[in-house]
Image (cartoon, rainbow, N blue to C red):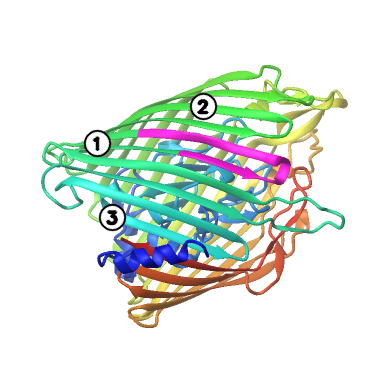
Amino acid sequence: MALSVPLILLADAAPAQTVEDLSTLSIEELGSIKVTSISKRPEPLSDAAAAVFVITAEDIRRSGATSLPEALRLAPNLEVARLNAAAYTVTARGFNSPESANKLQVMVDGRSVYSPVASTVFWEAVNVPLSEIERIEVVSGPGGTLWGANAVNGVVNVITKPATDSQGGFAEAGYGSGERAGTLRYGVKAGDGARGAKGDGMALRGYLTGFDRRSSHTVTPGDTSTDGFDGSQAGFRFDGTAGGGKASYTLQGDLYRNHTEWLDTTLHGGNLLGRWTHRLGDGSSVQVQAYYDQQNRDYQVATDRLQTADVQAQHNVALGTRHQLVWGAQYRVWQSTFRSLVGLGFPEEDATISLGSLFAQDEVTLAPRLKLTVGMKAEYNSYSGFDILPNLRLAWRLSDAHMLWTAVSRSVRTPSRVDRELSGLGILAPSPDFRSERLTAYEIGYRGQPVANSRVALSAFYNVYDDLRTTSLTNGGLPVMLRNDMEGSTYGVEGWGSYGLTGWWTLHAGANWMHKNLRLKPGTTDLSDFQSAGQDPAYQLQLRSRMNLTPEVEFDATLRRVGRIAVSGVPAYTEADLHLGWQVTPSLEVSLFGQNLLHARHLEAYDPANTMPRAIGRSVYTRLRVGF
């Protein structure tokens, strides 16, 4: 490994500095992690009245994940399926396939990466250096009241570390049977504005990262295609405080360029985000955020350009002793340009889509142990018009160790350009009347500490859908048109928990089970054979064992079981991952990872309408981290 020698020399020459905080959180500390995705203000995870799972920086470091979708496998309330070397489908509570994984809102530091062109997340273009992530909040269930349309079945909120927590030098190099990767970061600060210090200060970090991922395995005889994936990214984050710590501000941005051999596709773009927060004397706060994002996808036969400009503001305020109110507004504009060299495309190459919204949510203390949350968002989309997204939650803290919650919510998936405008080849006609897909969700859950050294979360849901996408003939023949002729329900349960066997050994377990009952409306047909219903396993199971064998040596093992996907013929599979880590010095860490160790290769997802089937192989990966 070419980077190993210089990194070791840097480690020897550098002052003692830890690469990461290697101490694992206790079971009690896990419950006190602050989350923001449920109420748009910090609150302890143990008080969150929703099905929310938090992936910590320590979880990611010990998992061996080399991409954001791989890190998301740690969340038991998500379905993560890998299509090939570059592409993934990710969802919560069903509808997982390239055609239907369109009901999950994904944000990186408040910047949405959900595409209005195809109603999806292009995961191969979401490059977040995993070493810079502070936590990932994964919410299963609707989040439309706070996060808007398309937060239908869940929300993924990726939160990176402030620059004050990334000081000094850091380098990482990895080499394995399936991938090579490296990251270089450096951070500096001025003043005493580090977290927890008084006064004002500034901190800045910059990074460079790159990867080269080998092709996945072919499944179909005679398939000679390859899908190797490589890319690079550079970025920065600048954080500061002013007014004696009452105000804080952030400016951050990234530039990236990726390439996959599959269809010879190049992805490139960048983003810039600014945020200002002012804390008022009564515990209230005001926050203003704006960002610009540009995504470019260059195919062999088409080019896709998407520019996003977004500005939003929110105000958190306590009204007396019983009300905690958060309200705000948002305005977003997308500029989409799609040029095709074949007959399939949009009648107009350019399109502008605008979105505006107002929201308010009030947490009312009905009694010392009983809280009611009432919220609503009014959102206007230039494609679909007005949508009202209400939310009602009730949390009952039975004791300090046990809480019950229930919720009723409504959310929608708004039409994309593909839904409304895609046409061509005399086969597909535009669908100007395509409406928003609608969901009404009913949830109930428990969160608590049933025995000492444990933490458990359980939830059950019943989702009622209407106006789901179908593909229908026009006047009994060609061309076909996208319509809203599917309806029905899904229901299921999900849960996870942790138990500390000893001070050095902790077990984590998670599971979910779901059943779908979807149907066509009377008198309608669907030529796609329910592709929009998704390709979901009936169940998923995971068990993780985390051991600190000595203060310097750690050993982790993970066992995953994913049920059969009958509609696409993907068989059930069981896989195991292992991790052995050694903190050689306070500034040098060496790790060895084995992933998908039980089989030479396995199939995770397949959609014949989009790609050839690709198998994911066994891999061994070694990683070196050094601080200087």
363 relative to 299 in the view: left or right: left
Using the rendered image of the protein, determine whether residue 133 is visible from the camera's viewpoint. no
- Label at residue 62: none
Q: Residues within 10 Å of mark 2 (few under 14, many from 20)?
A: some
Picture coordinates of residue 543, whole percent (x, y): 52, 72
Circle nearer the N terminus (3, 2) = 3
Give the amino acid type for the residue marked by disc 2 in the picture.
Gln
In terms of secondary structure, where does tag 2 sit? strand
In terms of secondary structure, where does tag 1 sit? strand
Residue 537 in which image quadrant: bottom right
Please state which of residues 6 and 195 is positioned toward the viewer in this rendering.
Answer: 6
Residue 523 vertical position relative to residue 235 in the rendered view, above or below: above
Residue beneath the point at 41% across and 42% down: 235
Residue 373 vertical position relative to residue 178 in the rendered view, above or below: above
Please state which of residues 340 and 210 is positioned toward the viewer in this rendering.
Answer: 210
Picture coordinates of residue 480, whole percent (x, y): 81, 28
Using the rendered image of the protein, determine whether residue 491 is visible from the camera's viewpoint. yes
Which range is magenta?
255-273
Q: Which residue is mark 3?
A: 168
Q: Which residue is mark 1?
A: 277
468 relative to 372 in the view: left or right: right
Discs 3/2, front: 3
Give the amino acid type for the residue marked by disc 1 in the picture.
Thr
Picture coordinates of residue 179, whole percent (x, y): 59, 59
Please state which of residues 284 and 197 is positioned toward the viewer in this rendering.
Answer: 197
Q: Which residue is mark 2?
A: 307
Q: Are marks 3 and 2 in contact (CB under 8 Å)?
A: no
Circle nearer the N terminus (1, 2) = 1
Q: CA–CA distance between discs 3 and 1? A: 26 Å
Q: CA–CA distance between discs 3 and 2? A: 34 Å
